[in-house]
Amino acid sequence: MVILKEVFSKKELKQFVKFPFTLYKNNKYWVPPIINDEVASFDKTQNPVFEHADARFFLAYQNNKIVGRVAAIINWTEVKTQKIKKMRFGWFDVIDDIDVTTALLQKVNEIGKQNNLDFIEGPVGFSNMDKVGILTYGYDQLSTMITWYNHPYYVKHLETLGYKKFNNFTETYFYFKDIDITKYKRYAEIVKKRYELKALNFTSNKQIMPYVEEMFELFNSSYAKLPSFVPISDKQKIYFKKKFISFINPEYIKFVVDKKGKLITFSITMPSYAKAFQKANGKLFPTGFLHILKAKKQSKDVVFFLIGIAPEYQKKGVTAIIFDEFFKTYKEKGIIKTFTTPELDDNKDIRLIWKNFKPVTYKKRSTFKKDIEN
């Protein structure tokens, strides 16, 4: 028998966050979150997403033991402004028991029905800045700090319950040595001259701060055409700035501005923290932060986190400027390998960016969709 309990207290939220630590114990591909950071992201007094989103958290029990979890989410900007009547679910983890999955997703369906929504999609977070998708290929590949990992049976469970693949994502990697740097350097000079553009590089986070608000505005405008995109609010911009800035090396952030100093392109990469997070095992203290600091300084792998291009400059070659600047930094740092984050298969523009880099597809993931049942 499966019993669901809704999570309310901080103690219960910590149990919610810690369940995967049991489910994936000794799994060498799962990357744990920092427990206190994840709990804080669910705190409605700390995360500004709750100004326009609701979330309810549930744990599933069998014989007084936690066997599953799910977050049932409604993003009201999406529902009311974009008129997409979607019920979201995320932070979904279960043992290999279809009864547990059924109980959890029936609860999600129930909440969606109560709010007159049309369909369910998941796993997704509160916004596009959160993790997304169930892994469908690449179970034997190391996860990242910004992706969910899952067992193969998750897909079978969802399909058994009538869920269909909806949005599909691909993750790739490529080696720095395989890139023709001279070609991009030549293109970069041509594009800079043609459009009167200038690259900005940074040596401290303090230098970056004046551009952060403008960067998120550009992020909103450059991704607005994607069907799954929900804009980031002003308060969320401040929140994400605080949340991610400590993980980012300033030299791994590249901006391009026009002759008036307006930001027209940005890109952020970060050192690969996967192995450091595994060693930290959910805790910054007493030694977790040391592993993270070491990765920040010494990792020879990087994750291509975000890129944004002003709509009027898309398909004009400005990425050549960004790549030229990254190549200089990567050469200096001795970077070997670059990983991309999950990229929507329907986003053809982002896929074209990597076509000359000899990318290797190493993971695929999907969100799953089902109409809400009465």
Image (cartoon, rainbow, N blue to C red):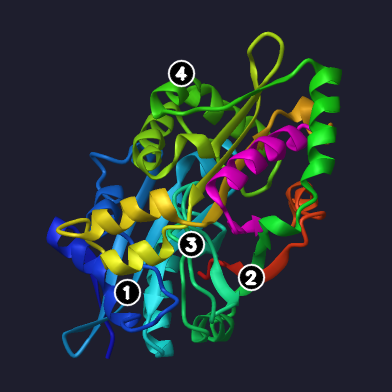
Q: What residue type is labelled 4?
A: Pro
- Tell me whether circle 2 and circle 3 mark residues in contact (CB < 8 Å): no
Mark 2 or mark 3: whose residue is earlier in sequence: 3
Residue type (three-letter) at the residue carrying disc 3: Thr
Q: Label 4 belongs to which residue? A: 210
Between label 1 and label 4, give the one nearer the viewer. 4
In this view, the residue in front, 280 or 101, is 280
Establish if 209 lies above or below 230: above
First reached walking from the N terminus: tag 3 or tag 1: 1
Q: In this view, does 290 lie above or below 155?
A: above
Q: In terms of depth relative to the viewer, which is nearer, 139 or 369?
A: 139
* Relative depth, front residue between 176 and 321: 176
Residue at image mark 3: 147
Q: Give the range drawn in magenta.
A: 317-345
Badge 4 vs badge 2, beta-carbon distance below 8 Å? no
Task: Name the residue rendered at 42%, 28% in the picture.
Answer: 204
- Residue 20's tag is 1
Looking at the image, is 220 positioned above or below residue 1?
above
Image x and y of residue 87, in percent: 49, 57
Q: Are marks 1 and 2 in contact (CB under 8 Å)?
A: no
